[in-house]
Amino acid sequence: MIETTETLLANTENAIANWNLGPAVVDQPGDPYWDKAAQVFGVSLAEAKRRICANCEYYDNTPERLTELETIPLNKFDIYGSQAHRGYCHKLHIICHTTRSCQAWERKDYEIPDDLAPPRDARAMYPNSDMA
Ligand code: SF4
């Protein structure tokens, strides 16, 4: 069960103040946020920019979680002005966004399934199309 809107906002303020949650805006060239993130992580600037909520083990964007997030009104931290890119952070208990980061970031492991089927022929999926 997700926290109340008020608690989520308070947690987000705390994350900004104490966990280096950011950046505040998206794709701002030369944003000093990432220089600080690189220092905090002890990695290069390029590597810091790869450590984002989208690939953090605490990031939850399951369909069930997104359904819950849709009940929370948009607020000033929603950089995309919509539900887009929202996810729930199990570490800081906030609504985070794919392109943000914080110093609690942890790598999310990814396993390629052993039984991965080869790509299906698109013509078999769409037999009535006139694709070449
Ligand atoms: S812990 Fe991970 S998912 Fe949570 S705000 Fe930090 S980077 Fe994003």
Image: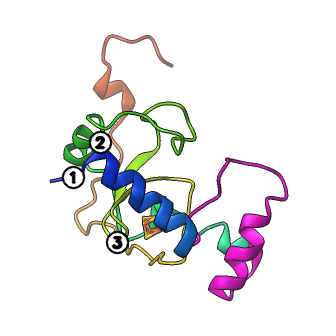
Q: Which picture quadrant has residue 121?
A: top left
Q: Which residues are magenta?
A: 20-45
Q: Give the class, few, some or many, for how many residues have Cα within 10 Å of label 3's Cα (few <14, many ≥20).
A: few
Question: Label 1 to label 2, Cα distance in Å?
Answer: 8 Å
Residue toward you, 36 or 117? 36
Q: Which residue is mark 3?
A: 91
Q: Position of residue 62 (x, y in %)?
A: 26, 50
Task: Give coordinates of residue 96: x percent, y percent.
Answer: 44, 54
Crowdedness near tag 2: few (<14), some (14–19) or many (≥20) residues, C-alpha within 10 Å: some
Does label 2 or label 3 sit earlier along the sequence? Answer: 2
Instruction: Report whether residue 75 is seen.
Output: yes
The kind of secondary structure element at disc 3 is loop
Alpha carbon distance from label 1 to label 3: 13 Å
Q: Is residue 52 left or right of residue 2?
A: right
Identify the amino acid type marked 1: Ile
Q: Mark number for residue 69?
A: 2
In the rendered image, residue 4 lying in the magenta stretch gets the answer: no
The answer to whether residue 19 shows anywhere in this view is no
Secondary structure under badge 2? Answer: helix
Q: Residue at x 29, y 35 (%)?
A: 70
